Amino acid sequence: MAAIVLTSTENLSREQWLAYRNLGIGGSDASVVCGVNKYKSPLELWMEKTGKSPQKEAGEPAYWGTRLESLIRNEFTLRTGIKVITVNQMLQSKEYPFMLANLDGVCRCPTHGKCVFEAKTANAFKAEQWASDLVPQEYILQLQHYLCVTGYSGAYIAVLVGGNAFQWKFVPRDEEIISMLIRYERDFWMHVQDGVPIPPDGSKACSEFISQQYPNSIAQSKILLPDSAADLIRRHNEADGQMEMFKVQKQEAANLLKQMLGEHEMGVVGDGYVKWKTSVQNRIDSKLLEAEQPEIFAKYKMAISQRRFTVKEPTSTYEHEDGYVQDELQLRKAG
């Protein structure tokens, strides 16, 4: 085995388990480090690993995934005849100590020898991601991470989809993916060790995380930004202009299609289609409620705090803007 036992997980509390997990990069972290995870950004993971942000509590899907793990493992053995041995240990790569592994189990393949076993659950809406020989990208990265840590030649992954559709697949070791993971994870871990933040990316997960970190602004506060901010503002405005252009093109196409449909709900062309369906939604008329029932409106109204993001591109000569030089000097003194 290309791994050492970092600790036994049999009697670890959640707090102890998280502390050990923050000593390196786990299999479920691999897709985050590579920037392909829809629910967590590299910056958020960096904040967790450096102790600057608490680890999020596992939600219902993760809870039931853990509860159903033994059932999936037993069903895999029943259908394949391959026995799975549970591993109550956290493993650490000998060659790459920043790579950790918490395996659901290990088993033996007739042609590949010792293999990793991984159990998953998925809701019915994700069934297409598991169609045919497909395995979701984030799980491919997780399995290849485990294969790097253990040195094994392959992995079995079994999944229960929608609570009533079971399937399993074999994933062979891929040296190209493993080499990529080592590069990405080594670079990420250097950021953790050096305390240098991971730059934000353009993902929705990153945007949500930053908004959660800085939910409110300090009234009338102002800072002097570095010169690189001017380029970022330009990039933002250029992208915004392109989005507006594509938005107009999209709306024009939609309007032409709507005109073709007229009163019809659906139109077909080849094996494609267009739908323009009437839907009715019941909403509270807040203005009417406030006018006719002000006490009830006041009782149930809720203030929602939200930061509005706006940008203005600087002129080519900063001193051109009235008061800018004086503001800059004051900001530099304040800093």
Image (cartoon, grey):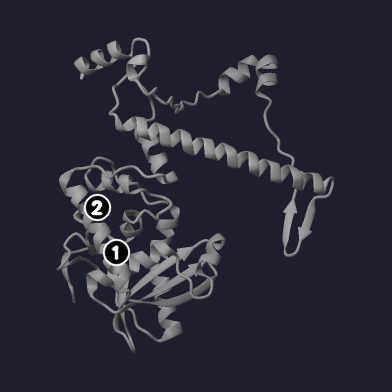
Asked whether residue 157 appears in the rendered view, the answer is yes
Q: Marks 2 and 1, how far apart in space?
A: 12 Å
Location of the N terminus (image quadrant): bottom left
The residue at the point 31 percent across, 45 percent down is 43
- Label 1 packing within 10 angstroms: few (<14), some (14-19), many (20+): few
The percent position of residue 137, horizontal first and vertical second, equals 42, 64
Location of the C terminus (image quadrant): top left
The percent position of residue 176, horizontal first and vertical second, equals 31, 70
The residue at the point 65 percent across, 44 percent down is 250
Label 2: which residue? Answer: 188
Q: Amino acid at mark 1?
A: Met
Secondary-structure class at tag 1: helix
Label 1: which residue? Answer: 180
The percent position of residue 8, horizontal first and vertical second, equals 19, 65
Residue sitting nearer the eye, 179 or 81: 179
The residue at the point 29 percent across, 43 percent down is 54
The residue at the point 21 percent across, 53 percent down is 189
Asked whether residue 25 appears in the rendered view, the answer is no
Is residue 187 shown above or below 287?
below
Q: Amino acid at mark 2?
A: Phe
Q: Is 48 displayed left or right of 315 in the figure?
A: left
Secondary-structure class at tag 2: helix
